[in-house]
Image (cartoon, helix red, strand yellow):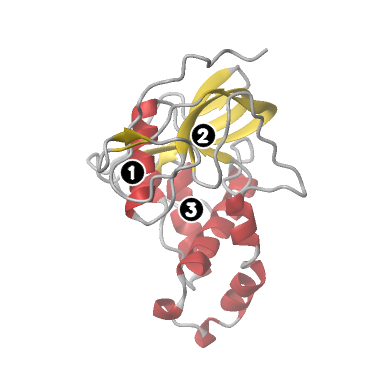
């Protein structure tokens, strides 16, 4: 493998794209099942993230695609296969050249502010994903903030996938109007839910309880509950 040079103008996304070890707060869009104040999140060898599970389920298929690309057409690949092609290439480049950065397939996806988190929640809803709530997390560990526009569509061409992966980890910005922040976080201390905003479905003008996900319409933060407290 080699590092690629890019004949484009480069802009810094954020001065602190890699943040290390200090206790910090993040916002997380909850799409699996409701969370509660005080709950702790734990990823282990037997309890991996949903991203890790979906990608690794496709690992053998990805290997076969690279060995026999003539047997596969790009237009016939399903969404999750394209994601696996991308994420495995990005992980290969990360391990070799950016090992101090957190792994995308083993990290929690978060935002550094509530505005970005609301944007992601609405994006998920438009794609048909169920959104329960946005929670505020308190924890320590390493995080990386990059540009989601650099998350390319995986192809049957491994060389292309590896080249595009460098753009993500190097935070290459080709167009200043196309920057969407995403933060990946690999925690050392288990993150605990510090505060839990509820979702509001503006179509029916009421506050959603965590057991009532927003499936369509607009997601908007409606404030933190009064019982929220800092966890020891």
Residue 26, placed above or below residue 105: above
Left or right, residue 20 beside residue 73 = right
Q: Secondary structure at mark 2?
A: strand
Q: Position of residue 20 (x, y in %)?
A: 59, 23
Task: Tell me where residue 100 appears, x and y as whole percent.
Answer: 63, 35
Secondary structure, mark 1, is helix
Q: Going from the N terminus, do you reach mark 2 or mark 3 first?
A: 2
Toward the right, the furthest residue is 46
Q: Earlier in the sequence, mark 1 or mark 3?
A: 1
Residue at left offset 52%, top offset 29%: 18
Residue furthest bottom as drawn: 71
Pointer 1 local density, CA inside 10 Å: few below 14, some 14–19, many at least 20? many
Q: Residues within 10 Å of mark 2 (few under 14, many from 20)?
A: many
Q: Report whether 42 appears left or right of 160.
A: right
Label number found at residue 144: 2
Measured Cα–Cα span from mark 2 to mark 3:
14 Å
Residue at 44% in and 82% down: 73
Quickly name the residue at label 1: 122
Q: Is residue 6 visible?
A: no
Q: Nearer the viewer, mark 2 or mark 3?
A: 2
CA distance for labels 1 and 3: 26 Å
- Which quarter of the figure is the N terminus placed in? bottom right
- Circle on res. 165: 3
> Is 151 in front, or is 52?
52
Q: For residue 169, which numbered disc appears in the image?
A: none
Above or below residue 109? Residue 222 is: above
Left or right relative to 160: residue 203:
left
**Residue contact at pointers 2 and 1, CB within 8 angstroms:** no
Q: Secondary structure at mark 3?
A: helix
Q: Name the foreground residue: 38 vs 160.
A: 38
């Amino acid at each position: 493998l080699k590092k690629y040079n890019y004949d484009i103008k480069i802009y810094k996304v954020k001065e602190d794209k890699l943040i290390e070890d200090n206790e910090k707060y993040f916002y997380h869009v909850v799409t699996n099942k409701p969370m509660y104040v005080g709950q702790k999140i734990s990823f282990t060898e037997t309890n991996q993230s949903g991203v890790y599970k979906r990608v690794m389920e496709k690992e053998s298929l990805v290997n076969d695609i690279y060995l026999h690309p003539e047997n596969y057409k790009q237009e016939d690949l399903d969404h999750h296969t394209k994601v696996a092609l991308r994420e495995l290439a990005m992980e290969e480049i990360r391990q070799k050249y950016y090992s101090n950065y957190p792994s995308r397939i083993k990290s929690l996806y978060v935002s550094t502010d509530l505005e970005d988190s609301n944007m992601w929640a609405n994006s998920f809803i438009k794609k048909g994903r169920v959104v329960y709530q946005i929670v505020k997390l308190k924890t320590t560990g390493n995080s990386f903030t990059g540009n989601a526009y650099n998350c390319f569509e995986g192809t049957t061409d491994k060389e292309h996938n590896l080249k595009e992966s460098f753009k993500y980890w190097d935070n290459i910005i080709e167009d200043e109007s196309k920057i969407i922040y995403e933060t990946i976080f690999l925690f050392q201390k288990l993150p605990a839910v510090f505060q839990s905003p509820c979702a509001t479905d503006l179509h029916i003008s009421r506050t959603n309880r965590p057991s009532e996900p927003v499936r369509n319409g607009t997601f908007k933060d409606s404030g933190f509950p009064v019982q929220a407290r800092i966890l020891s």
